[in-house]
Image (spheres, rainbow, N blue to C red):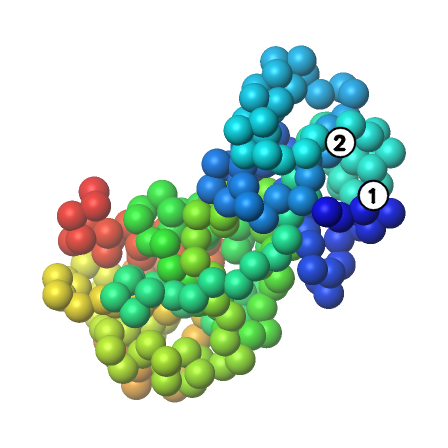
């Protein structure tokens, strides 16, 4: 069990992270209770939430630690009255599952929103290509509203590493401003998994990805240069999930 003196502001190199807030923490309790070290609560936590928390933690055999000092040490918002301390973990993607692939995502809020959209539209496997924002950064966890704990996430040194392990066995669809096909013109095969590939917020995907599978463009007006990454991913996975029988 983790000692209280090891609770400090989050650092990427630590073997643990924090799930800030009551809703994400309950999601963690339901999805992966085995990785929780403890749940910290502030004395200002609403009584009805504390009652529910005690019931859930008793079932999951998770310790509750009431400490204003520890909560205040790690939180970045004053209205955060509850936080789960959890061990980081590794997961592998399913070879027969559809993937979203993010090449060098750099914004924690975007990544968390993308994760939530993935789970919302039935995508449970996410590949991230380094360099990347830290998947266990508390801002990512909070932006995902705890959906990250229902996702399989695997990091790769480069897209080439991902392609060697998974790319040859599936249909690949890079989303690009100069993509060959307009979204909606492609119908994914029902008997083969696919990967939806997106670039980072600033640069998107470079021209080399035109040679990777069938490139797709999401048309928009000339009054913007591009869509927000989380918006583009949401549109992409919604369109493809319509053909998979999920919606």
Residue 234: x and y in percent read: 37, 51
Residue nearer the viewer, 18 or 76: 18
Local packing at callout 1 (Cα closer than 10 Å; few below 14, some 14-19, many 20+) is few
Which quadrant is the C terminus positioned in? top left
Local packing at callout 2 (Cα closer than 10 Å; few below 14, some 14-19, many 20+) is some
Q: Is residue 235 left or right of residue 40?
A: left
Residue 4: give its label: 1
Residue of label 2: 65
* Quadrant of residue 94 within the rendered picture: bottom left
Q: Are marks 2 and 1 in contact (CB under 8 Å)?
A: yes
* Quadrant of residue 60 within the rendered picture: top right
Number of disc labels: 2
Residue 167: x and y in percent read: 31, 78
Name which of mark 2 and mark 1 comes first in the sequence: 1
Q: Is residue 44 left or right of residue 148?
A: right
Give how far apart the Cα atoms at labels 2 and 1 are. 9 Å
Residue at the farthest top position:
47
The answer to whether one can see residue 50 in this image is: yes
Q: Secondary structure at mark 2?
A: strand
* Quadrant of residue 177 within the rendered picture: bottom left
Q: Is residue 169 left or right of residue 220?
A: left
Q: Residue at x 59, y 29 (%)?
A: 57
Residue 160: give its label: none
Residue nearer the viewer, 237 or 54: 54
Q: Residue at x 68, y 34 (%)?
A: 63
């Amino acid at each position: 069990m983790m000692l209280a003196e090891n609770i400090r502001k989050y650092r990427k190199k630590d073997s643990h992270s924090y799930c800030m807030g009551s809703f994400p923490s309950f999601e963690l309790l339901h999805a992966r209770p085995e990785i929780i070290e403890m749940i910290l609560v502030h004395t200002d936590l609403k009584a009805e939430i504390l009652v529910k928390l005690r019931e859930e933690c008793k079932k999951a055999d998770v310790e509750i630690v009431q400490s204003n000092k520890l909560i205040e040490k790690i939180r970045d918002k004053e209205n955060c009255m509850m936080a789960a301390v959890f061990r980081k973990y590794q997961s592998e993607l399913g070879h027969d599952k559809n993937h979203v692939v993010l090449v060098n995502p750099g914004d924690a809020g975007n990544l968390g929103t993308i994760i939530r959209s993935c789970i919302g539209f039935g995508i449970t496997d996410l590949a991230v290509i380094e360099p990347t924002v830290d998947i266990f950064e508390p801002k990512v966890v909070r932006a995902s509203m705890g959906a990250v704990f229902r996702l399989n996430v695997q990091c790769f040194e480069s897209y080439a590493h991902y392609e060697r392990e998974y790319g040859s066995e599936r249909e690949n669809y890079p989303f690009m401003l100069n993509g060959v096909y307009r979204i909606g013109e492609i119908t994914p095969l029902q008997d083969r998994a696919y990967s939806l590939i997106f670039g980072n917020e600033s640069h998107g995907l470079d021209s080399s990805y035109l040679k990777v599978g069938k490139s797709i463009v999401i048309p928009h007006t000339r009054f913007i240069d591009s869509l927000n990454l989380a918006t583009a991913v949401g549109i992409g996975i919604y369109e493809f999930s319509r053909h998979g029988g999920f919606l």
